[in-house]
Image (tube, rainbow, N blue to C red):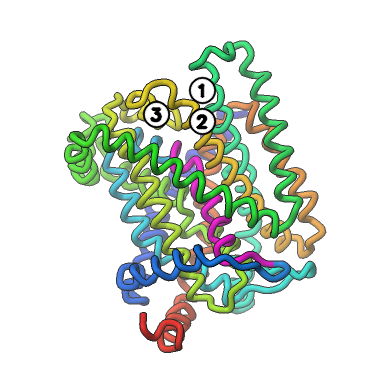
């Protein structure tokens, strides 16, 4: 049965992440960039100034909403996760170093895509029966497009509910247990016989913590993510920069292999990865898995922001993709490639490759710190995706009464993620990510005129006039 599911998923995955995905993701990102005059490049300094400035400004949000800082932290909580650690490692192993270049390209265009998603989400959001601000792809499809397009909103929500259990929960918990097991075994604190019991205990603890945060509502989610995300990001960046600095003599060679491998992967991987398209496919798909530009999911968190200016919140989308992919994913790639560890190109790999990059530079003691970083990354992703799933569930069934049962079920999936081998689930999660992107990208493409209008209005108003 599993072999049948695997073969079906592989067929769908190869189609979704084949030529159609490249055309949709790259094409829509390029189209939006052209229509906005490459806003993500032209207004990049302004975007950084606006977003960082608002992050440093402390204020309370009104009932049923988050502060703009809490909203971006919740969105970053979902994006900065195992995709940055395991996803990058897998992309390099299967697509070669050149996959990193295609991650950068997808991020460059993805900045404009995510800017558009966030802007539309805030512009077309609603207030639900509980007095909470709700928005995202399903709402900008419903409120921005004609009735004959509304089926896309339900399609996105259905894929969203299915995706969160794998992408947002089980695979993340699996990464937490793998990191903790590795650290404990390095110090001989646990034997291989005790791993299954330890994983079950970890699964139960994680499920309880997830339920505690998510059932506390939108306010508690915002309060947790605004503390956890900055800590984990700075912690990981410092560790990764240390690896790069200690192996600085390899940096020129690494960048050379990234650019060369992007177009002639066989020359860098010794023929193990010979396909230019494979390098591109893995770079783009894992880049999107990490920064979620094109999926529309991050805009669900941004729609909760206590702001009246959609475009101003949209700049957080640019900041988010830049931080996630250009900064953190690039540092992960440099940890793997600069450390000089052997990479079995053409074979699947995950977080263990990144951990090996750290331990080969610092020694086995650093496995404790990488385990902490990965736990923070994965837990924050679980929280962020829990919110996304709840919003999709609420829209799909038309009632906020479905949220709490969903949250309980979602929390319990953590136990499954901790105790089951999830090799197939990673691939299924990647497939559902691609399926979510399709209705969202169609909607963003059709609503591109609204984005252009809102941008023009913003930059002719008092706020953006001097930008």
| Residue drawn at point x = 72 percent, y = 67 percent | 64
| Residue drawn at point x = 42 percent, y = 20 percent | 364
- What predominant SS class does the magenta segment belong to? helix
Q: Nearer the viewer, residue 256 or 379?
A: 379
Labelled pair 2, 1 in contact (Cβ < 8 Å): yes
Residue 261, compared with residue 71, is above or below; it is above
Q: Earlier in the sequence, mark 3 or mark 1?
A: 1
Where residue 88 appears, as percent x and y from the top left, is 39, 40
Picture disc at residue 353: 3
Where does label 2 land, which residue? 371
Name the mark nearer the viewer: 3 or 1: 1
**The residue tagged with tag 1: helix, strand or loop?**
helix
Spatial CA span between label 2 and label 3: 13 Å
Spatial CA span between label 3 and label 1: 14 Å
Residue 310 counted in the magenta span: no
Q: With 314 as the anchor, is 267 left or right in this view?
A: left
Circle 1: is it few (<14), some (14-19), or many (20+) Cα within 10 Å?
many
**The residue tagged with tag 2: helix, strand or loop?**
helix
Residue 234, compared with residue 314, is above or below; it is above
Circle 2: is it few (<14), some (14-19), or many (20+) Cα within 10 Å?
many
Picture disc at residue 183: 1
């Amino acid at each position: 049965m599993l072999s049948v599911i695997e073969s079906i998923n592989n067929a769908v995955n190869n189609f979704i992440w084949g030529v159609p995905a490249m055309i949709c993701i790259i094409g829509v990102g390029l189209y939006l960039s052209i229509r906005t005059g490459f806003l993500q490049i032209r207004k990049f300094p302004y975007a950084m100034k606006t977003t960082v400035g608002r992050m440093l400004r402390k204020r309370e949000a009104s009932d049923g909403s988050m502060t703009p800082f809490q909203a971006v932290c919740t969105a970053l909580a979902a994006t900065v996760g195992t995709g940055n650690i395991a996803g990058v490692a897998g992309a390099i192993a299967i697509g070669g170093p050149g996959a990193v270049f295609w991650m950068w390209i997808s991020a460059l265009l993805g900045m404009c895509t995510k800017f558009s998603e966030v802007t539309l989400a805030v512009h077309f959001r609603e207030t639900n029966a509980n007095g909470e601000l709700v928005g995202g792809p399903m709402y900008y499809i419903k409120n921005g497009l004609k009735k004959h397009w509304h089926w896309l909103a339900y399609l996105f929500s259905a894929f969203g509910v299915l995706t969160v259990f794998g992408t947002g929960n089980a695979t993340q918990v699996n990464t937490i247990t793998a990191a903790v097991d590795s650290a404990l075994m390095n110090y001989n604190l646990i034997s291989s016989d005790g791993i299954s019991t330890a994983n079950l205990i970890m699964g139960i603890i994680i499920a309880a913590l997830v339920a505690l945060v998510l059932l506390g509502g939108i306010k508690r989610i915002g309060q947790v993510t605004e503390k956890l995300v900055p800590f984990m990001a700075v912690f990981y960046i410092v560790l990764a920069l240390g690896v790069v600095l200690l192996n600085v003599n390899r940096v020129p060679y690494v960048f050379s292999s990234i650019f060369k491998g992007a177009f002639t992967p066989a020359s860098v991987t010794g023929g193990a990865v010979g396909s230019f398209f494979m390098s591109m496919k893995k770079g783009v798909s894992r880049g999107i898995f990490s920064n979620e530009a094109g999926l529309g999911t991050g805009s669900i968190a941004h729609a909760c922001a206590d702001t009246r200016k959609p475009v101003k919140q949209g700049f957080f989308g640019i900041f988010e993709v830049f931080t996630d992919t250009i900064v953190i994913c690039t540092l992960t790639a440099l940890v793997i490639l600069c450390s000089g560890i052997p990479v079995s190109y053409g074979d699947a790999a995950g977080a263990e490759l990144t951990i090996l990059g750290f331990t080969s530079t610092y020694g086995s003691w650093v496995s404790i710190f990488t385990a902490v970083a990965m736990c923070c990354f994965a837990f924050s992703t679980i929280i962020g995706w829990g919110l996304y799933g709840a919003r999709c569930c609420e829209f799909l069934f038309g009632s906020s009464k479905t949220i709490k049962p969903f949250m309980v079920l979602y929390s319990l999936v953590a136990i499954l993620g901790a105790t089951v081998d999830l090799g197939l689930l990673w691939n299924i999660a990647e497939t559902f990510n691609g399926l979510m992107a399709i209705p969202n990208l169609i909607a963003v493409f059709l609503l591109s005129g609204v984005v252009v209008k809102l941008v023009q209005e913003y930059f002719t108003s008092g706020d953006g006039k001097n930008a």
